[in-house]
Image (tube, rainbow, N blue to C red):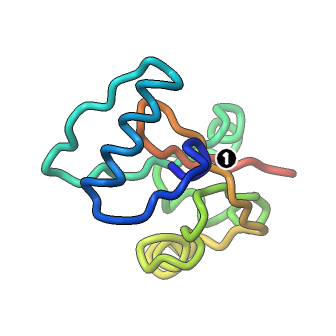
Amino acid sequence: MASVVKGDLSGSANKIYDDVKQFYEQKFQLTWLKPSNINNGYAMLVKPELAEKYKLAILTDLSAISKELIFGAEAGYSDRTDGLPALKRVYRIVFKEFKNSLVLISGIAHFLATTSI
């Protein structure tokens, strides 16, 4: 959110939600819905050509080529216990490089993996 709102997003979850909701309504004429009681998950995306070339269907498939990929995600993802350290621990995924870049689509964080192979 900080990369879009570019303001102070500190405080309680309700305050942050209200601030972001107001920003999106004023700037983009978009209305954020009330948060659900479930945790929004993360999705990892690769270009279709890359997925086809290396037969990528599940995260485990990515471990074979991850050392050749550049991974982009929100600030802090590289240090979060449920972020890059978990990908390494659970799936043996280790990227060549990490870049701080977040793309927002309908309020859901999508991570991009690009390749230099």
Tell me: residue 28, above or below residue 3.
above
From the image, tell me which residue sits under label 1: 54
In the image, taking residue 14 as reference, residue 69 lies left or right, namely right
Residue drawn at point x = 51 percent, y = 44 percent: 110
In the image, taking residue 38 as reference, residue 69 lies left or right, namely right
* Residue 11 place in picture, x, y as percent: 35, 65
Residue drawn at point x = 55 percent, y = 72 percent: 84
Label 1 sits on a secondary structure element that is helix
In the image, taking residue 49 as reference, residue 91 lies left or right, namely left
* Residue 36 place in picture, x, y as percent: 17, 44
Residue in front for this viewpoint, 53 or 91: 91
Counting other residues with Cα less than 10 Å from the Cα at mark 1, is it few (<14), some (14-19), or many (20 or more)?
Answer: few
Tell me: residue 61, above or below residue 32.
below
Residue drawn at point x = 30 percent, y = 49 percent: 40
For residue 52, which quarter of the picture? top right
Tally of numbered discs = 1
Residue drawn at point x = 48 percent, y = 76 percent: 80
Tell me: residue 68, above or below residue 43.
below
